[in-house]
Image (tube, rainbow, N blue to C red):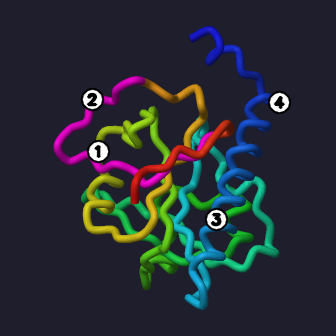
Amino acid sequence: MKERLAINENKMAALHEQISLNLKNFLIQFDSQRHGQEKLTIGGYSPLKYEPVWFQAFDKHVDWKYSLVHMHEDINLTYHSVDFAEILTGELGLRLEEQKLSSSVIPDVVLIPGLAYTRSLERLGRGKAYFDNYLKNYKGEKIGLFFGLQEVDDVFLEKHDMKLDLIITEKEIIRGNK
């Protein structure tokens, strides 16, 4: 626990950068294996204070489409197209503006934060099952983004909890059997 409390701003920035770089490198490889399909659509999130900033190592030169999650009050979520420049401003939140909600997209890859994870690709969310509800019928790649310090032995899964396909931290990529 002391190690978790001892992280300063410079260390946090380095952790965000490394997670983002690991994600970017994975997505470049993943995209290269899609042979001739449309541009990769990434379903991202607006990071809360202690969630990985997934886009920190990205740049405009990567030819992908971006969408952000919108969390509805009825515990459902949808993804909506956004420009990469809008993501960089950090001004988009968990509920997107009305004009962005006119049409939704289904991303090829969804990025999912959480409070904790296990090596078995289980995640502990914030308790309302927004992502679990979406993921139960989702066919794309489910990527959890975490700091290595968030690893635990058990997250005490409930019936509705969905496993991830892989987890990316600043130290490693943990893959499942897909």
- Give me the C-alpha separation between circle 1 and circle 2: 15 Å
The residue under label 1 is 128
* Disc 3 residue type (three-letter): Leu
- Give me the C-alpha separation between circle 3 and circle 1: 28 Å
Judge depth for marks 3 and 1 and give the one in front: 3
Locate residue 89: give its quadrant.
bottom right
Q: Magenta span covers which residues? A: 153-169
How crowded pointer 2 is (Cα within 10 Å; few <14, some 14-19, many 20+) is rated as few
Which of these two is toward me, 169 or 120?
Answer: 120
- Counting residues from the start of the chain, the first of labels 3 and 1 encountered is 3
- Counting residues from the start of the chain, the first of labels 3 and 4 encountered is 4
Q: Is residue 70 left or right of residue 1?
A: left
The residue under label 2 is 156
Secondary structure of the residue carrying tag 2 is: loop
Which of these two is toward me, 69 or 4?
Answer: 4
User: Residue sitting at 68 percent across and 45 percent down?
Assistant: 19
Judge depth for marks 3 and 4 and give the one in front: 3
Which of these two is toward me, 110 or 36?
Answer: 36
- Counting residues from the start of the chain, the first of labels 2 and 3 encountered is 3
Q: Where's the C terminus, which quadrant? A: bottom left
How crowded pointer 1 is (Cα within 10 Å; few <14, some 14-19, many 20+) is rated as few
The residue under label 4 is 10
Q: Is residue 73 above or below residue 102?
A: above
- Give me the C-alpha separation between circle 2 and circle 3: 30 Å
Magenta residues, dominant SS class:
loop
* Disc 4 residue type (three-letter): Asn
